[in-house]
């Protein structure tokens, strides 16, 4: 799709300025006073801190222990500190943050490698090397993010930096040439796309940041043309793995690194080659990709989640609004503007991408004031990933079909997620803090990945298996005014040792009344249904009460048992209380009926 227009590129590809330059005082003075004070206060606080030291031992720790978090805290703290200082300088314009900005630039320029230890490999599933080889840089997500950060600083503060020394911008340009542009153009990394190999968020995310880097700096026309042509091929590879419905199989969290980064890439291309890329905004598939986040929203910060996504997601920023505007989706633009109002962080202090933060300061205040956006009342089917969402005034229901070979997969074929009055009822737990194990052959030893910790059956201890051959069959969906009904056979998601000949799950929302889940199975082993909740359950014969939220009436079950799970992981605690619960409901016979009110 994109590659077809490589031959139509103009001889001269223009520049891209990721915001307003430091000398544009009217633009920077337009940042609202309350936000200015936040930004300058954070820059002042950063001025008083030391940049973290990063040693070779810190880098090696990942291959020794599998811990990602400790190195990444040091690495991202450096970048966030530099971000804070740059935004303080742009907003204030007094030169007092410049010396420390230069310190931060040179510290990062002197790092042995910009790639994370967890990504320090030359093949997609290759061995992670203990230390970076600076003669063969790896272009991963955060090498590209780092280049984009430094290029954005030079683009916005070049004059001020040149007044200190022209060597600052020159050093940034040399490092980017060696670490990003030369390897990008000179070798193949898996995320660039080749043949039918499946891509993921890496492709759009890195492509956006390489484009941002190349067009923010004073690069040559041959370099610009070569980068654009290669990027267009990668974006084609990225889009090929999306169905026309636009759903992100990696979950709503990754929407911002996937579809939203496609928006960033297209925004840059549209600016540097005017008139050539605007046609893509009108494509239904791109619009569907844009609107996905709004359809996944439940209430407040809660979203339907699956894969490695959390149930609680940060509010929208100006980026989602701009995407809605670009594709002509008033619904998405309104949703994003209203959701952004709910944020207490209008300057995105946790963000490491400087371009996003600049957009937030300059574009964010121009967004229309919007009333709190009601949760979407629309049913929607995403057959491309087997996701079905139905709602009424009280319930928001999602059923996940698909298969167990998707990006950031959890073994969750047939699982149900349910909210009542915007509150979590039956939950998808999400994922713990990433470690080496998360993306290894031992991934499914982690409890959050297992079907026994989703709202699914287990057969004498046998759970679902990973891989795209393990999936749902015979899926039937019917939405009408009075009800929504999703029916699917999930027996194909289980291995032969489950001795399962069939397992039909029928999930119905009878609007204005209740939810019904009817599970019927044919197999040689006893079945136990897991139900996950974050509310303390009270069990009595034929009934489960979930605190003050509602009840599950059960027919066809034996005696229900409750497992209390203590949640200690920081990533899980961002969504859930310190205790969550697994109800284990055994089948008395072959049919189990749940009525949820």
Image (cartoon, grey):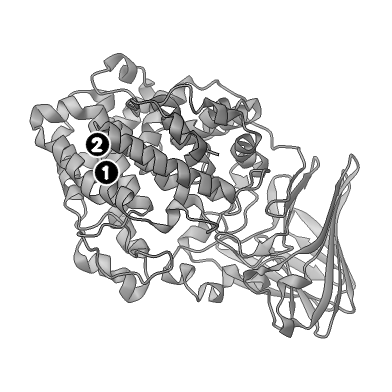
* Residue in the foreground of this view, choosing between 315 and 444: 444
Residue at the spot of label 1: 81
- How far across and down, in percent of the image, does residue 178 sit? 21, 49
Instruction: Name the residue: 78% across, 83% down.
Output: 499
Question: Quick check: 501 above or below 439?
Answer: below
Horizontal placement of 341 versus 132: left or right?
right
Q: Is residue 199 above or below residue 29?
A: below
Binning the other alpha carbons within 10 Å of mark 1 as few (below 14), some (14 to 19) or many (20 upward) gives many
Dots 2, 1 in contact, CB < 8 A: yes
Tell me if residue 507 comes above or below residue 233 in the rendering: below
Disc assigned to residue 417? none
How much space separates mark 2 and mark 1, taking CA atoms?
Answer: 6 Å
139 and 520: which one is in front? Answer: 139
* Residue lying at 74% horizontally and 54% vertically, measured from the top left: 548
The image quarter in which residue 289 lies:
top right
Determine the image quadrant of residue 503.
bottom right
Q: Is residue 303 visible?
A: yes
On-image quarter of the C terminus: bottom right
The residue that disc 2 covers is 85
On screen, residue 419 versus residue 436, left or right, reads: right
Q: Residue at x 68, y 54 (%)?
A: 385
Residue 466 location (% of width, % of height): 62, 71
x and y, in percent, of residue 242 in the image: 61, 48
């Amino acid at each position: 799709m994109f590659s077809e227009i490589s031959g139509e590129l103009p001889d001269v590809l223009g520049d891209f300025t990721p915001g307003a330059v430091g000398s544009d005082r009217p633009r920077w003075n337009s940042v609202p006073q309350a936000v200015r004070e936040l930004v300058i206060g954070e820059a002042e606080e950063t001025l008083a801190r030391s940049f973290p030291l990063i040693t070779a031992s810190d880098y090696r720790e990942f291959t020794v222990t599998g811990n990602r978090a400790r190195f990444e805290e040091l690495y991202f703290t450096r970048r966030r500190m530099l971000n804070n200082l740059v935004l303080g300088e742009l907003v204030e314009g007094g030169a007092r943050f410049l010396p420390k900005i230069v310190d931060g630039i040179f510290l990062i320029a002197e790092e042995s490698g910009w790639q994370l230890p967890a990504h320090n490999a030359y093949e997609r599933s290759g061995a992670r090397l203990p230390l970076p080889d600076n003669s063969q840089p790896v272009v991963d997500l955060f090498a590209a993010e780092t280049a984009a950060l430094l290029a954005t600083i030079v683009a916005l503060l070049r004059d001020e930096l040149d007044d200190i020394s022209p060597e600052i911008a020159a050093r940034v340009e040399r490092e980017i040439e060696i670490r990003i542009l030369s390897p990008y153009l000179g070798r193949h990394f898996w995320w660039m796309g080749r043949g039918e190999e499946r891509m993921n968020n890496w492709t759009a995310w890195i492509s956006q940041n390489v484009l941002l880097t190349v067009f923010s700096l004073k690069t040559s026309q041959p370099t610009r043309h070569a980068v654009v042509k290669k990027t267009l091929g990668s974006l084609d590879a990225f889009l090929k793995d999306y169905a026309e419905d636009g759903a992100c199989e990696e979950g709503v969290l990754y929407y911002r690194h996937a579809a939203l980064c496609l928006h960033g890439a297209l925004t840059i291309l549209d600016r540097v080659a005017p008139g050539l890329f605007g046609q893509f905004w009108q494509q239904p598939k791109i619009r569907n990709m844009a609107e996905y986040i709004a359809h996944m929203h439940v209430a407040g910060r809660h979203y339907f989640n699956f894969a490695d996504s959390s149930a609680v997601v940060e509010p929208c920023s100006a980026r989602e609004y701009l995407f809605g505007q670009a594709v002509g989706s008033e619904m998405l633009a309104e949703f994003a503007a209203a959701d952004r109002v709910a944020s207490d962080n209008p300057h995105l202090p946790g963000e490491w991408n400087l371009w996003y933060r600049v957009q937030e300061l300059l574009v964010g205040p121009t967004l229309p004031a919007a009333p709190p956006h009601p949760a979407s009342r629309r049913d929607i089917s995403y057959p491309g990933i087997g996701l079905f969402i139905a709602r009424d005034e009280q319930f928001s229901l999602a059923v996940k079909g698909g298969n167990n070979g998707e990006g950031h997969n959890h073994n969750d074929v047939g699982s149900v997620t349910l909210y009542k009055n915007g509150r979590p009822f039956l939950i998808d737990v999400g994922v713990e803090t990433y470690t080496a194990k998360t993306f290894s052959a031992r991934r499914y030893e982690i409890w959050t990945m297992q079907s026994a910790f989703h709202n699914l059956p287990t057969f004498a201890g046998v759970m679902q298996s990973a891989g795209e051959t393990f999936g749902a069959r015979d899926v039937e969906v019917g939405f009408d005014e009075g009800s929504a009904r999703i029916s699917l056979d999930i027996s194909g998601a289980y291995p032969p040792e489950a001795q399962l000949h069939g397992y039909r799950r029928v999930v119905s929302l009878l609007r204005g009344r209740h939810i019904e889940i009817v599970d019927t199975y044919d197999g040689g082993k006893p079945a136990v249904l897991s139900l996950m909740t974050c509310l303390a359950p009270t069990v009595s014969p034929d009934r489960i009460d979930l605190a003050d939220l509602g009840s599950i009436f059960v027919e066809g079950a034996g005696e229900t048992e409750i497992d209390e799970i203590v949640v200690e992981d920081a990533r899980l605690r961002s969504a859930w209380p310190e205790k969550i619960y697994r109800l284990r409901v055994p089948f008395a016979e072959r049919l189990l009926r749940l009525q949820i009110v």
